[in-house]
Amino acid sequence: MQKGNPDLDRFDRSILAILAEDGRISVADLARRIGLSKSPTQSRVKRLEAEGIITGYRALLDPIRLGLDHVAFVEVRLTDTREKALAEFNAAVRKVAEIEQAHMIASNFDYLLKIRTGSMSEYRAVLAEKISSLPHVANTSTFVAMEAVKETGVSGAIDGMG
């Protein structure tokens, strides 16, 4: 898979933007919206999938309706930041279902985690039993989100490409 800024033309960017908003759109409707016929549109989608730009399709779930409305961001400082320790931490993080996102940060802490649970008491249990016991954790700081003002995927950034 190619890293960096792939060579995408306006049709590719349109396909990506539309699929990011509606992954269930038919090829015929997609073709009509981007201004190409069905066959070249389908070929482009298959190429974008083969190149790893489109990595899959999934349903977007409403966490509030599922009772998962407690969001906390956790700064994590590690005791060791050598490559082996980072790999161990990363592997362990991937196994914790409540961690929605994990980012290595260039700051005075090492990782920023987004944790989603149903309540503060559930979060406290996750912090105590799962986050704090991750490999190489020195300390954590928690920030509780009061409201999600904007949450989008990469689709909003596609228009700014090229």
Image: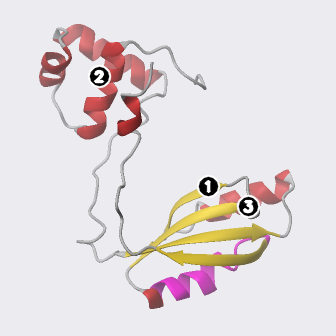
**Which label sits on residue 103?**
1
User: How far apart are the alpha carbons under marks 1 and 3?
Assistant: 8 Å
- Mark yes or no: residue 56 visible: no
Alpha carbon of mark 1 to alpha carbon of mark 2: how far? 28 Å
Contact check, label 3 and label 2, Cβ < 8 Å: no
Residue positioned 70% across, 73% down in the render: 134
Q: In the rendered image, which quarter is residue 30 located in?
A: top left
In the rendered image, the vertical position of residue 123 relative to residue 4, given as above or below: below
Query: Is residue 129 found inside the magenta-colored segment of the image?
Result: yes
What's the amino acid at mark 3?
Asp
Query: Label 2 near label 1: C-beta < 8 Å?
Result: no
**Camera-side residue: 147 or 111?**
147
Q: Secondary structure at mark 1?
A: strand
Circle 2: element type: helix
The amino acid on which the numbered mark 2 sits, given as a three-letter code, is: Ser
- Binning the other alpha carbons within 10 Å of mark 3 as few (below 14), some (14 to 19) or many (20 upward) gives some
Q: Residue at x 29, y 53 (%)?
A: 60
Give the magenta-colored segment's residue range: 122-136
**Residue plotted at (59% across, 60% down):** 94
**Along the line of sight, which residue is nearer the eye, 33 or 2?**
33
| Residue linked to disc 3 | 110
Q: Quadrant of the N terminus?
A: top right
Residue 155 visible: yes
Vertical relation: 110 (above or below) 59: below
Magenta residue check for 147: no
